[in-house]
Amino acid sequence: MCLESSPIVASYHFTKAGGINIDVFPEVYSPREDTFLVIDNIVLTPNIRFLEIGVGTGLISIFAAKRGAIVEGTDINPAAVGNAKHNTATNDVNARFHCGDLFEGISGKFDLIVFNPPYLPISEGDKLQKWEEEALIGGHYGVETSIRFLEKCPEYMNRDCIIYLVLSSLGDTDRLTERFRDRFVFEKTAHVDFNKERLTLFGIKNKTE
């Protein structure tokens, strides 16, 4: 069940796109460096069909909607879907959000697909709540969730669709890119370094003959 009202644990105001106000519900991934890596580097044009997987608080989707995109999104965490709907309403923009794993509830094709996935590998001693594990841990190598995502992407891509995907230097990025080297072209769009980790935003396109 996706609740659109909940105790608010934090509130932020972001100046981009004319100002965005974000409330954060309990057990929802708060905007961080990876969120802003996406916002600062994705290319948006009005009326494109925009899909975000893993919407969290909805900040990226709201940013896209304020730039004129037609926005849909999903999150496996019901609290996040409720949080994104709440923030969409308070920012007076339109977007459709679905509760489900990856593309669950989504139909049609899109011009731009964004995923800031769980990208950390499993580490011994991790003691995380279920929602934290879903938001942070991408599998044994840190890329298994992203591999599942890319396997499903072609069904939802328009011909010139661009995928934006965040990956961490702590995960086995080579494992992912090698798996899809015959299907996609991977371009390192931007990166940010912190705490001995590099986060890279990849722009991914279909490989043409």
Image (cartoon, grey):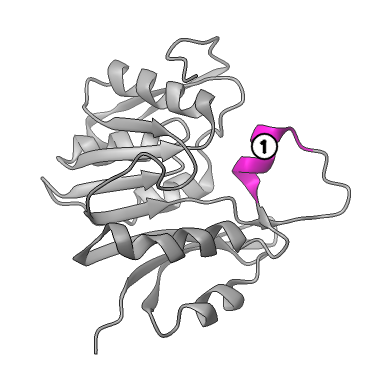
Q: Is residue 12 left or right of residue 40?
A: right
95 in relation to 175, above or below:
above
Q: Residue 31 location in percent, x, y? A: 50, 36
Q: Main secondary structure of the magenta part?
A: helix
At horizontal 74% and vertical 32% (from top left) the residue drawn is 129
Give the image location of residue 25, x and y in percent.
53, 20
Number of marks in the rendered image: 1
Q: Position of residue 157 (x, y in %)?
A: 26, 61
Q: Quadrant of residue 160?
A: bottom left
Return the residue found at the far bottom: 209
State the residue at coordinates (49%, 28%): 80
Q: Is residue 97 above or below residue 188?
A: above
104 vs 17, nearest the viewer: 104
114 relative to 93, above or below: below
Question: Is residue 12 visible to us here?
Answer: no
Residue 103 can be seen, yes or no: yes
Question: Image point 68% across, 57% down: which residue?
Answer: 139
In the depicted view, which residue is nearer to us: 153 or 39? Answer: 153
Residue topped by disc 1: 132
Q: Nearer the viewer, residue 47 or 33?
A: 47
Residue at the left extreme?
47
- Residue drawn at x 46%, y 47% is 102
Q: Quadrant of the C terminus?
A: bottom left
Boundaries of the magenta span: 128-137
Crowding around mark 1 (Cα neighbors within 10 Å: few <14, some 14 to 19, many 20+) is some
Identify the amino acid type marked 1.
Answer: Glu
Residue 187, image x, y percentages: 38, 75
Q: Secondary structure under badge 1?
A: helix
Q: Would residue 117 appear left or right of 62 to someone viewing this image?
A: right
Tell me: 139 left or right of 29. Answer: right
